[in-house]
Image (cartoon, coloured by chain):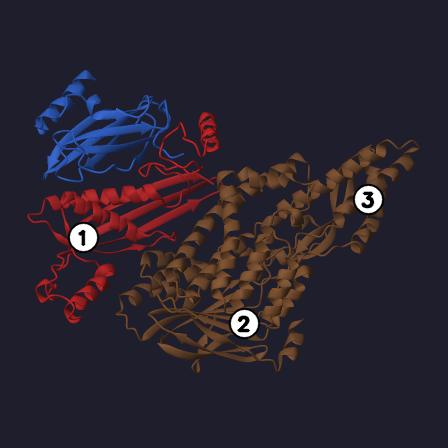
C-alpha cells in the first residue's frame, strides 16, 4: 500500500513541476464529513496539450454499493481558483469496486486542483451536498 | 354466528332505506348550475354571468366559481378578465400543489375525514381540470397575442402533470391501506351492484394513460414551442400527441415536418395556422343511490348491512358534436378530434372511485356504529325486539348517509372536445365556416405572423372565434356568429 | 431547527424594533439552495443531468480544441430532443458554449437561432441612415464558422411495478463544414433508477 502511494506520488512529481503541487493524495482531497467507505486511493495528473488531466481512483471499502459525489476546484499556481464552482457529480461505486474517473481541466489556466468528495454514508456534522 | 340471520333481516328492510333515500334528495352541483349553463348555451352570456354571481353570492369564492366565470368571460371575448379569473383559480390549484409537495399527508388526510361528506370538502379540482386550466389560460394568452406567457403556462402544465402523477400514486396506496384497516371488501366500482360499470370500462376511457395528460395539451405545447423556435421542446409535444392519437396523418406531421418547417425560410405572408375547434361541454356528474354491503358493528356483533349510498356517475356524451371538416375561404380542411373531455372526466372518476368508495363506506359504518351504540341503553326486551330496535337505529343512521348527494362538482363550462385543423394561410382575414347540427356557422378571422392560433368555440347554436397575432399584443377578435332560426329544432334534437 | 423557528418568531415579534439576529434576510419559509448540488427530487431530466452533460461535453471539446494550432471558429446547431420529455436542449448547448468561451479554447460564430437578430441589426445599421458611417458595422464581413456542432439526446425508459429506470444518451459531433468530415464526437450517458 505504501509503495503504491509512493509510486503515485512519484508520478505526480514527475508529470507536474509546479511548486504549488503538494506531496500527498490527502492534501489534494477534501472530504465532506467523515469518510466511512468511499475514499480516493489513487491520483495521477498529466498535462495534455496544455490542459491538466486527472485520473482519480475512488475505492469503496464496503460490500454494499455506495453513492458518492465529487467535484474539482481548479486552481492556478498560487492556489487561486480559475473556474467557477463545479456541479457535484454523483457516482455509484459498487461494493468492493475501485471506480476510475478521468477528468480534464476546463481551461489551460488551471495548474493545480483540489478534489472534493462526499458520500451518503459519510458521517456529517451538517448536511452533505445532496439536496435531499 | 349471530350476525348471519340478522343480516338477512336487514336485507328485507333495505328497500325501505332506499325509499327514504329517494325521497330526501338535496340539490347537487348539476342542478345548481343548470340555469347558468342553459343561459350560456343559449348565447345569453351576460345573463349567465349574472346567474353565476347570484349562485355564488358569498364572499368566499371557490375554485369552481373562478373556473366557470373564466369561460363565460372568454366566450364574451373579454380575454383580459377571463385570464384574471382563471389566474385566481390557478392560485388555488397552486396552493393545492404546494400542500401536495410539502406535506402530502395533509391532503391525503382527507381520506381520514370520513365523517364529512365529500361535497363539503374543499374542491381542489379534478386532475384533468387542473391541467386544462393551464390549457385555457394559454389560449387566453394566445388570444391576447402573448406567446411567451402562453409558453410559461404550458411549462406550468408539464410541472403540474408531474405533481399530479406523484400524488395519485400515493393517494391510491393510502386508500387501499385504509380499506384494509377497516376490513372493507368493496373498493372497486365493479363490485357495486347496479352501478353503470360500462361508463367507466368504456374502451375510450381505458385507453387513456391517465386522466390528465391530453393529446391536445401536448399538441398545443408543440405548436407554441415551434412558434417560438424551440424545436427541442416542440418535438416531445408533437411526439406525445402522436402517441396518444396514433396513426393520424395530421398529428404525425407535427413531428415529421418539424425540422423542415423550421429550416424553411419564413415569409411574413405565410401564416402557419392552427385551428382549435372546441365543441360541446364537459359532462355533468349525476348521483345514483345504490346499496353497498358494509360490516357495521352492533350489539350482536358485526352485521353485514346493505347500505344505500349515493354514487357519482358520468354518462357518455351521445352527441359527439365534432364537425368532420372546417372550411377556410371555401377550402375544406379535415378536422381531427384530439381530446374527449368526457372520457377524461370518466377516467378521473374511475381513478377516484376507490377513494370515494372507501370514504363513503367508512362514513356509513361510523354513523351506523354510533347509532347502534346509542340504541343499546334502551334495549331490554327479547332478542327479536332488540334486533328490530337496532335495525331501526341503523336505518336512521344509514339513511342520513344515503340522503347525501354524491360529489357532483365538476367544471361544467369546459369544452367537451378539443379538435384541430392546420393549414398555411396568407396573412389577412379569412372566412371560416363550420357545419354543425344547428346549421352553418361562420366567422371572419384575421391571421398574421409566421404562426397563428385560431380558437373556434361552438357552444349551443353559437360560434365564438379568437385569433392570435404572433408576438403582438393586439387581440383580434371576431364577433360571434349569432344565429337563431333553427336553434329550437336543433336544441330539441340535441336534448336526447 | 426549532431554535431557528423560535428565533424567527422573536424576530417577527420584534418586527419594528431592531432584530438581534441580523442576517440580511426577510423571514419566510423559502430557502436558497446550492445550485451545484446533486438533485434527486424526481427521476425526470434535471439540473444535475444538464450540468454533468454540459460539463462533460465542454471538457471533451476543449481537450480536442487544445490540440488545434489556432482556436477553431465553430457554430452550434440544434441538439435534437428524441425523448418524450420536455428537455430544453438549447439550455444545454448554451452551457457548453459558455464554458468553452470562458476557457478560451474555442470561438463561436452566431448560431442559427441568433442569426435573425444579427442580420436585423446589421441591416438596421446599414440601411436606416441613423448611424455615423465610420462606426457602422459593414456587411459582408461576418466570419464563417469552420466547424459545426450538432447532436441529439435519446432516452430509454423502462418501468415495472416497483422501479422506473431512465437511461439518457447525449451525443455530440463536430463536423468540418468545408470538408464534411467529422472531427470529433463524444457522448455522455446517464442512468437513473427510482422506486415508483
Mark 2 vs mark 3: same chain? Answer: yes
Residue wearing tag 1: C174
The shade of chain A is blue
Residue at the extreme top of the image, as rendered: A2
Residue at the outermost right position: B381
Q: Secondary structure at mark 2?
A: strand
Compute the Cα span from label 1 to label 3. 79 Å
Q: Quadrant of the C terminus of chain A?
A: top left
Which chain did the image draw in red? Answer: C
Q: Is A127 left, or right, of B130 in this rendering?
A: left
Q: Is residue B109 above or below residue B159?
A: above
Query: Could you tell me if the residues under marks 1 and 2 are in contact, i.e. CB atoms within 8 Å?
Result: no
Q: Which mark is residue B458?
A: 2
Q: Is disc 3 on the same chain as disc 1?
A: no
> Do tag 2 and tag 3 residues touch (Cβ < 8 Å)?
no
Q: Colour of chain B?
A: brown
Q: Residue at x 64, y 36 (%)?
A: B180
The residue at which mark 3 appears reads as B396
Residue C75 seen by the camera: yes
Number of residues whose C-alpha sits closer than 10 Å to that of mark 3, classed few (under 14), some (14–19) or many (20 or more): some
Looking at the image, is mark 2 or mark 3 earlier in the sequence? 3
Q: Chain of mark 2?
A: B
Q: CA distance from mark 2 to mark 3?
A: 48 Å
Which chain's residue wears label 3? B
Q: Position of residue C90 (x, y in %)?
A: 28, 53
Q: A96 left or right of C4?
A: left
Please name whichever residue, C54 or A80, is drawn nearer the observer in this view of the structure.
A80
Q: Nearer the viewer, residue B482 or B168?
A: B482
Q: Residues within 10 Å of mark 1 (few under 14, many from 20)?
A: many
Amino acid at each position: 500500500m505504501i509503495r503504491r502511494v509512493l509510486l503515485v506520488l512519484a508520478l505526480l512529481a514527475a508529470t507536474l513541476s509546479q511548486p504549488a503541487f503538494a506531496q500527498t493524495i490527502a492534501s489534494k482531497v477534501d472530504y465532506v464529513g467523515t469518510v466511512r467507505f468511499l475514499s480516493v486511493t489513487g491520483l495521477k495528473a498529466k498535462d495534455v496539450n496544455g490542459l491538466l488531466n486527472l485520473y482519480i481512483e475512488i475505492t469503496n471499502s464496503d460490500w454494499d454499493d455506495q453513492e458518492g459525489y465529487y467535484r474539482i476546484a481548479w486552481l492556478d499556481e498560487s492556489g487561486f481558483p480559475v473556474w467557477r464552482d463545479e456541479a457535484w457529480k454523483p457516482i455509484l461505486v459498487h461494493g468492493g469496486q475501485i471506480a476510475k474517473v478521468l477528468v480534464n481541466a476546463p481551461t489551460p489556466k488551471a495548474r493545480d486542483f483540489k478534489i472534493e468528495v462526499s458520500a451518503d454514508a459519510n458521517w456529517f456534522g451538517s448536511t452533505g451536498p445532496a439536496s435531499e | 354466528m349471530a350476525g348471519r340471520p340478522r343480516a338477512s333481516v336487514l336485507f328485507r328492510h333495505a328497500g325501505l332505506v332506499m325509499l327514504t333515500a329517494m325521497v330526501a334528495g338535496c340539490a347537487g352541483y348539476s342542478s345548481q348550475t343548470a340555469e347558468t349553463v342553459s343561459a350560456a348555451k343559449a348565447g345569453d352570456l351576460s345573463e349567465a354571468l349574472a346567474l353565476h354571481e347570484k349562485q355564488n353570492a358569498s364572499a368566499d369564492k371557490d375554485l369552481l366559481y373562478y373556473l366557470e366565470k373564466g369561460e363565460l368571460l372568454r366566450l364574451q371575448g373579454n380575454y383580459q378578465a377571463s385570464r384574471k379569473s382563471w389566474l385566481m383559480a390557478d392560485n388555488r390549484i397552486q396552493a393545492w400543489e404546494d400542500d401536495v409537495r410539502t406535506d402530502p399527508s395533509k391532503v391525503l388526510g382527507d381520506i381520514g375525514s370520513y365523517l364529512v361528506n365529500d361535497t363539503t370538502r374543499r374542491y381542489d379540482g379534478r386532475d384533468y381540470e387542473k391541467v386544462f386550466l393551464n390549457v385555457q389560460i394559454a389560449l387566453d394568452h394566445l388570444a391576447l397575442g402573448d406567446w411567451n406567457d402562453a409558453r410559461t403556462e404550458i411549462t406550468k402544465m408539464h410541472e403540474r402533470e408531474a405533481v399530479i402523477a406523484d400524488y395519485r400514486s400515493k393517494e391510491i396506496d393510502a386508500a387501499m391501506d385504509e380499506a384494509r384497516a377497516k376490513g372493507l371488501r368493496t373498493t372497486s366500482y365493479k363490485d357495486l351492484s347496479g352501478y353503470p360499470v360500462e361508463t367507466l370500462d368504456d374502451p375510450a376511457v381505458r385507453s387513456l394513460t391517465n386522466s390528465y395528460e391530453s393529446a391536445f395539451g401536448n399538441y398545443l405545447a408543440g405548436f407554441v414551442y415551434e412558434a417560438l423556435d424551440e424545436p427541442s421542446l416542440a418535438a416531445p409535444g408533437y411526439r406525445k400527441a402522436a402517441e396518444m392519437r396514433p396513426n393520424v396523418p395530421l398529428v404525425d406531421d407535427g413531428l415529421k415536418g418539424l425540422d423542415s418547417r423550421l429550416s424553411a425560410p419564413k415569409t411574413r405572408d405565410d401564416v402557419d395556422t392552427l385551428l382549435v375547434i372546441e365543441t360541446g361541454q364537459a359532462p355533468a356528474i349525476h348521483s345514483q343511490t345504490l346499496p353497498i354491503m358494509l360490516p357495521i358493528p352492533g350489539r350482536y356483533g358485526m352485521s353485514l348491512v346493505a347500505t344505500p349510498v349515493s354514487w357519482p356517475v358520468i354518462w357518455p356524451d351521445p352527441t359527439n358534436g365534432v364537425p368532420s371538416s372546417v372550411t377556410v375561404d371555401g377550402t375544406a380542411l379535415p378536422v381531427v378530434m384530439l381530446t374527449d373531455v368526457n372520457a377524461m372526466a370518466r377516467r378521473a372518476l374511475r381513478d377516484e372511485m376507490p377513494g370515494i368508495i372507501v370514504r363513503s363506506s367508512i362514513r356509513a359504518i361510523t354513523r351506523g356504529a354510533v347509532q347502534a351504540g346509542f340504541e343499546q341503553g334502551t334495549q331490554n326486551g327479547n332478542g327479536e325486539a332488540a334486533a328490530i330496535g337496532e335495525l331501526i337505529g341503523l336505518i336512521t343512521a344509514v339513511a342520513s348517509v344515503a340522503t347525501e348527494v354524491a360529489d357532483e362538482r365538476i367544471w361544467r363550462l369546459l369544452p367537451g372536445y378539443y379538435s384541430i385543423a392546420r393549414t398555411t394561410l396568407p396573412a389577412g382575414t379569412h372566412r371560416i365556416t363550420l357545419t354543425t347540427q344547428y346549421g352553418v356557422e361562420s366567422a371572419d378571422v384575421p391571421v398574421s405572423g409566421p404562426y397563428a392560433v385560431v380558437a373556434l368555440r361552438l357552444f349551443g347554436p353559437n360560434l365564438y372565434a379568437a385569433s392570435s397575432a404572433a408576438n403582438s399584443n393586439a387581440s383580434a377578435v371576431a364577433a360571434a356568429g349569432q344565429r337563431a332560426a333553427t336553434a329550437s329544432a336543433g336544441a330539441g334534437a340535441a336534448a336526447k | 431547527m426549532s431554535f431557528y423557528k423560535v428565533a424567527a418568531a422573536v424576530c417577527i415579534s420584534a418586527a419594528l424594533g431592531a432584530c438581534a439576529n441580523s442576517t440580511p434576510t426577510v423571514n419566510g419559509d423559502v430557502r436558497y439552495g446550492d445550485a451545484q448540488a446533486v438533485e434527486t427530487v424526481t427521476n425526470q431530466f434535471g439540473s444535475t443531468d444538464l450540468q454533468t452533460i454540459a460539463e462533460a461535453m465542454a471538457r471533451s471539446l476543449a481537450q480536442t480544441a487544445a490540440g488545434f494550432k489556432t482556436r477553431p471558429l465553430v457554430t452550434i446547431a440544434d441538439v435534437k430532443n428524441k425523448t418524450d420529455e420536455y428537455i430544453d436542449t438549447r439550455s444545454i448547448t448554451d452551457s457548453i458554449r459558455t464554458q468553452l468561451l470562458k476557457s478560451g479554447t474555442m470561438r463561436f460564430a452566431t448560431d442559427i437561432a441568433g442569426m435573425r437578430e444579427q442580420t436585423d441589426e446589421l441591416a438596421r445599421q446599414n440601411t436606416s441612415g441613423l448611424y455615423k458611417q465610420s462606426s457602422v458595422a459593414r456587411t459582408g464581413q461576418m466570419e464563417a464558422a469552420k466547424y459545426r456542432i450538432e447532436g441529439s439526446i435519446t432516452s430509454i425508459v423502462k418501468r415495472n411495478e416497483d422501479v422506473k429506470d431512465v437511461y439518457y444518451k447525449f451525443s455530440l459531433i463536430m463536423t468540418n463544414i468545408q470538408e464534411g468530415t467529422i472531427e470529433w464526437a463524444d457522448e455522455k450517458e446517464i442512468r437513473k433508477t427510482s422506486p415508483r
